[in-house]
Amino acid sequence: MNSEFCLSCRDIERYLGEEESRVHALRGVSLDVEFGSTHAVVGPSGCGKSTLLYILGLLDQADGGSITIASERVADLPDEEWSRRRNELIGFIFQFHFLMEDFTAQENVMIPMRRLGRLNEAEMRERAAALLEAVGLGDKAQRPSRHLSGGEQQRVAIARALANDPQVILADEPTGNLDTDNSQRAFELLANLVRQRQKALLLVTHNRFIADACDWVHEMKDGRIVSSHPRGQRISV
Amino acid sequence: MTAPFYIALRFATHRKRALLLSLVGVVFGVAMFIGTQAQTQGFSQYFIDSTIGSNGALTIRSRFRPRYEPLIVGSKSTNANAAHRLYFEGIDNASEIMRVSRQFSNVVSCSAVLRGTLSVRAGFENATVDLFGIDPPLYVRTTDLAKQLISGSYNDFQNNTSSLILGSRLASILDVVPNSTVQLLTPGGEYLRFNVAAIARSGVGSIDASRVYAHARVAQTLLKKPFAASMIVYKLRNPDRAPELAKHFEDLFQHDAQSWQEREQSTLQLFLMLRVSVALTVSLIILLAGFGIFNVLTMSVLAKVREIAILRSMGYRRSDISAIFLWQGALIAAIGSLIGCLLGAALTWGISRIPIRIRGLLYADHFLVIWDWRHYFEAVLLAMIAVFIASYVPARRAAQLPPVATLRGSSL
């Protein structure tokens, strides 16, 4: 496997459901995501985008194929090791931000850091404050997450995904709940960070402007990547 | 502070009402356990102290020899051995036995007693009494008789061989007080007059209703026994080791030796049964508290499915998720036990203040309690076990939740 790839998968197979309702969700999907690049996965609902994202994010087990993150094959590792790599190497951003409602914005950002356990309480607070500052929420760090607007919550989720300085950022419709301005701002934030810090961003989106702004766009249909285009090539979303 | 503990703390404090309900169950269960154990064991301990204080921790009685000679007689560790013995009333060489006994480190003191049954008369009242002929200076060192006096003086008894000490209930039946006169009926049909020097209350109903103490020489005259002592009573440093010493004394002296545990076996079993019965009943409260916690945590798991999935996506392991819910249970158990222990102590104090008139097996004017750290330890242990079991299932269930199923719910 080429070491210039931050995230890579080969021939991923995945079946969902049981017996008669069993669906072949992913049919031999292969993908390479380089360091410092942004990749968008587009396609109609039910084509397997999110399934691919969860498998690459080590949240779901593929029925076949291999996954490599930071030059290490990870598909066959036990659950404990998957958890450790999710914590250290992967940052997730979900459509519905999925913040912990009982926690403040700062405490939400600190949750992955607590698990990693590399920083003390003061250092964690400092880093969380810096990340919230970076997403424009420095003044709202102590606010309970449920008292933030949708756009603000999504920015907290972005800050949280970056908490442990992961190599791979996986985003499932990260701007799906945001208006155009907020969508643009959130994406630019992520894209800049990925390029500056040589990380990798793979996002699933229905937003053609966001997809167009990525370095690569992969179009999926019926569980397959039917085409991959570098930036600038016109696609139909 | 570990990450699971921190999150558990936040989850628990966020659901204050559920936390409070769970706490109430544990607090109530622990407090009730402590209070009832203190009270039931209080009566039991009072009985033990009274009976040891009155009859000694160990007694040596009749001499025996094997029924089938020349078999060597062992101790009566089995009933079969005891059945093969011939008993002879009275103790041979009581002085020698006492001299040898005092060499044992567990023996504090011992005293010979000549015991028999007589009739007593005072005015128009008659009663059958259990006469203890004692050596006053020796007996007072071996038992709590001096402490048990509720009126009169032990010195008056010691200095006057024509005086007696009467059990409190017996004195009440005969309607006598110190300095009253009573008459004892000898086996020859003759009444002899005695002065009542003191009244004693041991606290054990059967003793207080029948016991009369007289000087040993007087008792020997009254009872007309061919021996000087019918038993030897012992005060031991460690009364709990009385059975071992009794066995040893039997082997050594060829006399029947009985520990207080054996002597009061039936009463002690009654107390034990009562205590176990109450403990079982109260344990049900803790068990119910456990069910309550099980429900609260199960509901918490259901309510936190989304949060569990988020935590898993951020790299929290299954064991971390389990730990979050186990910590919540542990928090409930710890806080509940602490408050429960404090409440249990208050309950024990409160129970000890409840006035109650007991004039049967025991003599008491209020509830008797015992302060024993083991009650607190047992209650906390029981609560911990119940809460752990109650927390384990929801915790395990939380850990097994597949995060992707929850996360898929928002985007396909």
Image: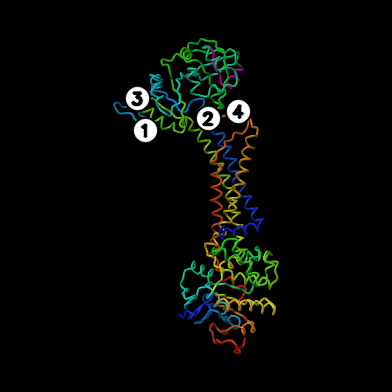
Q: Is residue B394 at least partly visible in the picture?
A: no
Q: Is residue B5 above or below residue A89?
A: above
Residue at the bottom extreme of this rendering: A234
Q: Which mark is residue B49?
A: 2
Pointer 1 residue: B80
Q: CA distance from mark 1 to mark 2?
A: 32 Å
Tell which circle, 2 or 4, labels the residue nearer the N-terminal end. 2
Tell which circle, 1 or 2, labels the residue nearer the N-terminal end. 2
Q: Which mark is residue B359?
A: 4
Tell which circle, 1 or 3, labels the residue nearer the N-terminal end. 3
In which quadrant of the rendered image does the N terminus of chain A lie?
Answer: bottom left
Relative image position of residue B49 (x, y in whole percent) = 53, 30
Q: Are marks 1 and 3 on the same chain?
A: yes
Relative image position of residue A166 (x, y in whole percent) = 55, 72
**Could you tell me the amino acid type at mark 3?**
Arg
Q: Are marks 3 and 4 on the same chain?
A: yes
